[in-house]
Image (cartoon, rainbow, N blue to C red):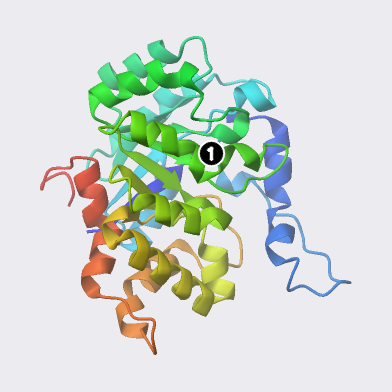
Amino acid sequence: MIIDIHTHIFNQDWTAPIFWEELSKFPSTLYRKTRKAEKKIERRRVDILWDPGGEALIQEMDRAGIDRSVLFGLDWGLALGEPPVSIEEQNQKIAEIALRFPERMAFFLSVDPRRKNVFDLLKRGKEEWGMKGVKMHPTSGFYPNDQQFYPVYEKISDWGVPILFHTGVILPPLRSKYSRPIYLDDILVDFPSLNLIAAHLGTGWWEELAFMATRRPNLFMDISGWQQIAWQHPEEFCRILRRILDIAGAEAVLFGSDSPAYRGLPLIQIEDWVKLIQELPNRSSGEIKFQQSEIEAIMGKNASLLLNLGEGESK
C-alpha cells in the first residue's frame, strides 16, 4: 500500500499570476549550482500542471503504483490577491474530484485561518465535502502559533483530523520566515490530541523538526519536495533521511510527492521517486542502512493510521 500524503490540483484561475510566473522560473532555481554560467535554463510551461478533473494525477498514480493520494489546494489569496475562482469554490471542486475517485483520493480543506469565513469553510469541509484533514500555508503571512487561531485549532482537534502545515522554504513573493517548524511547537503542546503534519521535512530545518518529534508524539513530517536532493545528491539524501529516522523514528515520517510541482522537469518523475524510496533497503551500504519495515511504514502504513483509513479504504 502506497499513500501520497501531499498532492495538489492546480488550475490557471486558482491563484494569482505571480505564482505561475515564479513557478515557471523554478528550473533555473533548481539547477543554478550545476548549470554552466553561459547556459540559460528555459522556463517551464506551467499549463502542463493544470488538471481540472484530476485525470492527470490518476495517470501518475497508476504509473507509480500509488494506491491513494491526499489532495488539497493553496489558499494564498490574502497574500497574493484573490484569484478569479474563490478558495471556497476551489475546495468544493477538489472535494468533488476526490469523491469521483473515492478509492484513490482523499480531500484536505485548504484555508488561511485569518479568513473571516474560516469556520464556515471548515464546517462545509467536514459536513458536506468529506474532508480528511486541513492544509494551511503560513508563508502567506502568519505565524501558526498566533493564539488568535486557537479556536480554529480547537474545532479541528474536536473533529479528530490532522492539519498539514507547509514548513521550509518557498518561492517569492511568499516568505519562508513564517514556516519554520518551531512555530508549530506551541500548537503541539497546547493541543496534544491534534495531529500536525510538517510538509517537506522542514527543508533546511529538518534537524530541528526531527528533534521536535522526539518529544511531540502528535507531530508527523512528509518527504515531499526532496526529489531534487535525492536526484542530484542521493548519498546526501540517504544520510539525511537515515538521520531523521534515527532521531524521530520511522513512525513519524510520511511519503509525499508535492505533485504536480515537479511535473515536466528533468528530475526523477513520480514513479522514480516511489521506486527510489521503496528500494532503499536494497541499496543500503556502509553505515547507512534502511529496514523494509521502516519503508513500509513511510510509504503507507503511517498515513493509513493517521487518516483512520479502514482496510477497505486503504487498498
Q: Position of residue 34 (x, y in %)?
A: 73, 74
SS at circle 1: loop
Residue at the left extreme? 311
Residue 178 as seen in the image, left or right of residue 54: right
Placement of 183 over or under 223, stated as above or below: above
Placement of 25 over or under 63, stated as above or below: above
Which residue is at 65% across, 46% downward? 46
Q: Quadrant of residue 96?
A: top left
Which residue is at 48% across, 29% downward? 145
Placement of 2 over or under 304, stated as above or below: below
Residue 119 as seen in the image, left or right of residue 138: left
Q: Position of residue 121 (x, y in %)?
A: 40, 16
Amino acid type shown at disc 1: Phe
Q: Quadrant of residue 287?
A: bottom left
Which residue is at 71% across, 33% downward? 17
Residue 223 as seen in the image, left or right of residue 48: left
Q: Position of residue 213 (x, y in %)?
A: 36, 51
- Residue denoted by label 1: 10
Placement of 167 over or under 17, stated as above or below: below
